[in-house]
Image (cartoon, grey):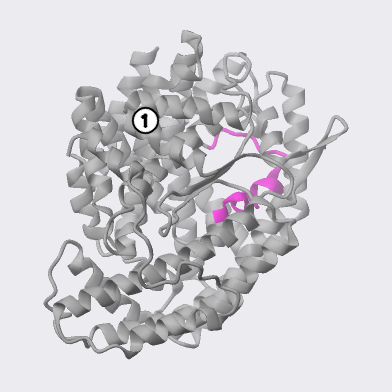
Amino acid sequence: MPISDYQTFITDSTAPCRFISQDAKIESWEDVLPYFENLKSRTVSNEAELWTWLEDRSELNAWLEEDMAWRYIKMTCDTLDKTAVDRYTFFVEQIDPEISLWQNELDKLLITFPGFDTISFAGSEILKKNIRKDLEIFREENIALQTEIQTKAQEFAAISGAMGIDWKGAEITMPQAGVILQSTDREERKEVYEKIQNRRFQDGEKLQHLFTDLVSLRHQVAINAGFENFRDYMFVSMGRFDYTPSDCKSFHEAVEKRVVPLVTRQIQQRKANLKVESLRPYDLAVEENGRPALKAFEGGQDLLDKGKEVFRRLDPVLGNCLSAMEEKGHFDLESRKGKAPGGYNYPLDQSGFPFIFMNASSTLRDMVTLMHEGGHAVHSIVTRFLPLSFFKHTSSEVAELASMSMELMSMDHWDVYFTNPEDLKRAKSEHLAQVIDTLPWVATIDAFQHWLYENPTHSEEERTQAWLRISERFSSGLVDYSGYEHFKSIAWQKQLHLFEVPFYYIEYGMAQLGAIAVWRNYKTNPEKALSDYLKALSLGHTAGIREVYEAAGIRFDFSESYIKELMDFVGTELEAIG
């Protein structure tokens, strides 16, 4: 499909609801129940009736998911807004448990319908495999546990969102404070580092206890479902049909062998350039040649306006994706007190245009985050007309390929943000260095999660020691944490995935490798690489991971030899930038 044809995904309106009432609202479970009862009561005797049933169920799912999405979005935009928090909590506690029960009932019904085993359309085999997987792991006793887990995960957002420090007489958020770590004044960096870490440490024990509760609850979910541990449960739950826990551990070993030495050389060079006797943790963000931090934009609107232009230069269709979202008010970009940490692109299946949330200040990293979430947004938009909502929710290995590839393909147009050629070269170099840094951190977090859930009865002290041991495995060992050991011991607590979306992290490593391969293709033939990229994204969840990667013109491969090949390519590109 020519890239220009994707414009129809932006300009065509969403089909009107057929099954759900136009004015339907969710104020109680009674507002939802009749739709489930309708589906359960139907007689399905042929393929046409089965397809209509699937379409109506898909419409119901899209309505429920979008209602939940807006509650989550509003809650994360302001964790101090009690009404928003209460509306989200209401859905989690009163609606979600009932949905889980009824979805299981509909799954059991679906596999009995005449023709279910023989239906054949794009994505049908993946759909059938996932339905059977969901039936296999469903346990009614886990519904209450899952509700409690979601509620506790929300506590993490509230605790983190309330964090801030006093800086020169004003209270600033943690993302804003992080910008000061790029100061060329070493004493200023030291001061802000200690303020940030002391503030995190203030809630360190609270987050430790919260996480202990989460590990215990998750382990019980796994035991109830017949699994030895939560890791094995999650591999099935997440539909990881293309790789195993053993493959993940091979990835860890490959990163340790092929990437950590590259990071170590970067750290050695940083220490030499900074001319410091001891490299301290507050020396890691500053530009190592003594230049002020790059400032990519002035405020959220400037970030977005320039982002639209970068996407437009890649192709006008991509720029139009962000413009359409802006017209709908689907951005909240700037950091402020009470806002939950992190960033995300939240798909909105019913309306078709996602919402981007982030905590921007002014940094290069913030700009890259918009490129990243913008890639997710494009993915959401090019799948909006797939016939079933199931097909719009891809595996995370594919979702992150969309976002990380966009980061790299967009680099040649970053002069929109950095008009000075030297600043542009710096931005590219710093980002590629960060690409290399990403892989050891991904391996660290993933290896930590494997340990956590393979050893579910561990104490908090054992957890701390495991974290220190695993993080040391993937580090250069050149950073001096003397006097800051207590900060280092809780560094994992800043990673929201551990609290909110367990085992969603190895995908960043796999997708980073895929994105480098997409970028390598783009450097050779931009038009073909971009066309292949959009073709792969438009498959949604109608195809498996390997098939999607192949459509993008790359391999789903995280072997040691492939990692070395791609790291060599990144190294060559870094040298070419100069």
Question: In the rendered image, which quarter is residue 21 located in?
Answer: bottom left
Question: In the rendered image, which quarter is residue 332 located in?
Answer: top right
Q: x%, y% of residue 352?
A: 40, 52
Q: Amino acid at mark 1?
A: Leu
Quadrant placement of the C terminus: top left
Residue 96 is left or right of residue 414, and the answer is right
Q: Nearer the viewer, residue 181 or 175?
A: 175
Q: x%, y% of residue 65?
A: 46, 65
Residue at mark 1:
408
Give the residue at x 65% y 67%. Answer: 87
Residue 395 visible? The answer is yes
Residue 332 is left or right of residue 244, and the answer is right
Verify whether residue 484 appears in magenta. Answer: yes
Residue 177 is left or right of residue 366, and the answer is right
Q: x%, y% of residue 538?
A: 26, 48
Region of the chain picked out in magenta, as a range:
477-496
Label 1 residue SS: helix
Quadrant placement of the N terminus: top left
Verify whether residue 480 appears in magenta. Answer: yes
Please determine whether, in this image, residue 274 is positioned above or below residue 142. Answer: above
Give the residue at x 65% y 52%. Answer: 490
Question: In the rendered image, which quarter is residue 483 located in?
Answer: top right
